[in-house]
Amino acid sequence: MVAGRGAGRPVAGPGREARAAAHHDALSSKNPTKAFDQRRAGHVPGDTDLTWTRLTPWRALLATALDAPPHEPVTGATVAGEVVSPSTDLLAGWLVARLPDAKVKRSPAERGPGVVSVRLERPSGAVSLVRPDGKVGSLRQKGQPDRLVALARREVRDCLAEELRRLDDDEIYREALVGVGKAARGRTPVKVPELAGT
């Protein structure tokens, strides 16, 4: 599984005038879903969103967990978070793009800020990453001890610093944008467990 990157130079597309790649932040949009629709329709190489950058630790942890044994296919995934959470939507879109044979569902979480949990179903057991308080998460997978991981919500300055370190095109971000519209929508809030040891 590949975690992704992003930003760039002026590009023209069929029937479009050239425009410079842009940095966005769906979190500041009045309607993040509409903002993603607009970005998907008008995407040019180099476009990125700070919402994507906020997800780097989540994507890295999930990719690492799936790269470790057992090497089994993911059959389903549930991403849960606040009802209005562009980060939760984009993380679900990334999983749609990375796991084409799995049904990915984006659901509300019972409680917690932003992205709260991800559950990846595999034949031998689920991989789950849960962050109920917006600060500390727990990574759980069969055959390994539960791990507490730092998953504090990232500040804008940290996201900008990450974006400025790399100014190349991020194809995986574009694929995640496309995936946002393909994730199934759950209505029932996902229960969020308390973390032991926090």
Image: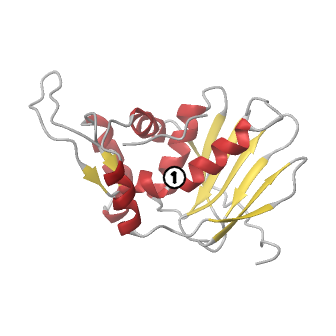
Residue 190: image quadrant is: bottom right
Going by the image, does 79 lie left or right of 158?
A: right
Q: Residue at x 48, y 60 (%)?
A: 85
Pick out the residue farthest to the left. 17
Residue at the far front in the pictured view: 165
Mark 1 secondary-structure assignment? helix
Taking the spot 21% from the left edge, 42% from the top edge, the residue there is: 21
Q: Quadrant of residue 45?
A: top left
Task: Kindly identify which residue carries mark 1.
Answer: 56
Q: Is residue 139 above or below residue 69?
A: below
Residue situated in front as seen by the camera: 9 or 40: 9
Asked whether, in this view, residue 125 is left or right of residue 76, the answer is right
Q: Name the residue at 28% across, 39% down.
A: 46
Q: Position of residue 78 (x, y in %)?
A: 66, 47
- In the rendered image, residue 161, in percent from the top left (x then y), is placed at 36, 60
Residue 73 location, x and y as percent? 75, 29
Of the pair 25 and 191, the residue shown nearer to us: 25
Q: Nearer the viewer, residue 10 or 34?
A: 10
